[in-house]
Amino acid sequence: MRRMLLPGCAALAGCLILPAGAQTVSGTVNVTGFVQAQCGTIVGATTFSGTIELGQLAESNGTLLTGLEQSNVSSPAGSTSFELGCSTVNSTVTLSATELATSTPPPSGAFSNTVDYTAEVEIAMAAGGYTRITYTTAPVAPAPTVQTVRGQFAVIAGNFEVNVYGLSATNGPSSILVAGDYTSVITIEVATAA
Amino acid sequence: MQKVMLLFGSLLLATGGPAMAAVTAIAGGNPSHIALTIPVTAQVATSCSFAPGQAPSGSFTNADIVSGFINNFGFSLLCNCPSRVAVQSANGGLLAPLSAPAGYTNLVPYQVTLNLVGAADVPTVSATCSAESLKASAAQPCSFRGPATANRGLQLSGPAIETAGSYLKVSAAPFDGSAIPVASNAYADTLTVTVSAAI
């Protein structure tokens, strides 16, 4: 472009054609975040439930299977597992269960239509080892077991294993189990803890 | 179904989890905790038989056909559910292995009574039928003609656990039929007793 300068404007024209001097400015941007104290299923997991199917309960003579009576923490009658995680170091686990029962009433004390058992939650810990929580059912339901778990759960599949063992017919080992479908529910609550 | 054979005298009795969506619980939030419910399920199959060593069995060898007779065969049930017991007669009466001329008979009738005792609070039941109506080919069969099934036989409405008192009774009043029984010491019948769960 051709520039035309008037003589009286030389000084001004000189200002216009000079490049501006470089300036440096600085600022600070802070970024903060947080992780809520929370518990949940592991990313990618879509379900966290299961059913423990114990199958046939009775011997051929009608009494509770000896193998179920003698089942224990090392050799449970039934199990299921799932994966949970909490963002806090500690958590609270609450465990309860109902008796295994069928709706047909027993005709006498020589029969049973309910079976008690111990439910156990075995939690694999990030630091190694396990935390175990148990609850044993009874005709008059005991208060739920509430336990603070110190340390974080191991981030592995099946870090929560639920076991059932030590079954006993309500009216004694020699009682006859009435025929029918028997059901029970184990309830586990997991919450963050300080 | 269990079958036991009985032999009596000249009567031969043969009794013969739903999946849940992922949940995150936040401290102080709603929900504040994760609640998992795990169903525990099991079954006790129906089981019904005669108690070990207490099945109806034996024989009654001195049935006096002319004067009448009576004899009980005791047994116990071991059932964790309602049951049905049924009886089947081989001959439909006491049958002699002889031909019977006109005016005589080689088949003598008798009665069969079934009495079932269950656990406490289970009502005892009893019924009587003629041996004739217990025969497989009977035109008018007895309500407890065997073999027992879930729907056939005398029903005990509840479980039984080796409770004493159940019996099978064979009996006959003094013979008063129009035909004369042929002489024989070999009148015989076989009753087959069976038990089945009623559900």
Image (cartoon, helix red, strand yellow):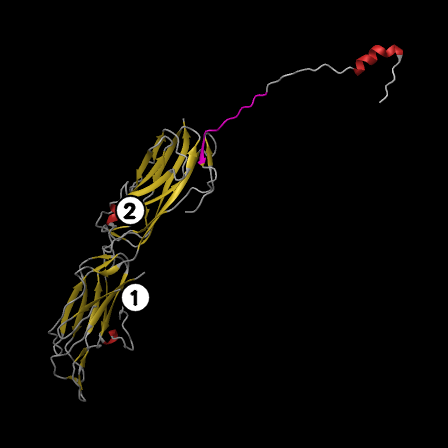
Q: Residue furthest bottom?
A: B102
Task: Between residue A182 and residue A108, name the one nearer to us.
Answer: A182
Q: Position of residue B53 (x, y in %)?
A: 16, 61
- In the rendered view, would you say B108 is above or below B59? below
Q: Residue at x 48, y 29 (%)?
A: A36
Where residue B187 sits, quadrant-wise, is bottom left
Identified by mark 1, the residue type is Thr
Q: Residue at x 80, y 13 (%)?
A: A15
Q: Position of residue B142 (x, y in %)?
A: 27, 72
Q: Where is mark 2, residue-wise?
A: A115
| Residue range of the region highlighted in magenta in the rendering | A29-40
Q: Disc 2 sits on a residue from what chain?
A: A
Q: Is residue A191 visible?
A: yes
| Label 2 neighbour load within 10 Å: few <14, some 14-19, many 20+ | many
Asked if residue B159 is among those painted magenta in the image, a careful observer would answer: no
Characterize the magenta stretch by its predominant secondary structure. loop
Do discs 1 and 2 belong to a common subunit? no
Q: Is residue A169 visible?
A: no
Relative horizontal placement of residue A54, taking residue B129 as reference (left or right) = right
Q: Disc 1 sits on a residue from what chain?
A: B
- In the rendered view, would you say A183 is above or below B48? above
Q: Position of residue A123 (x, y in %)?
A: 36, 36
Relative horizontal placement of residue A69, taking residue A8 as reference (left or right) = left
Identified by mark 2, the residue type is Val
Which disc number belongs to residue B149?
Answer: 1
Give the Cα distance between marks 1 and 2: 30 Å
Relative horizontal placement of residue B31, taking residue A98 as reference (left or right) = right
Q: Position of residue B131 (x, y in %)?
A: 22, 74
Task: Between residue B63 and residue B51, name the one nearer to us.
Answer: B51
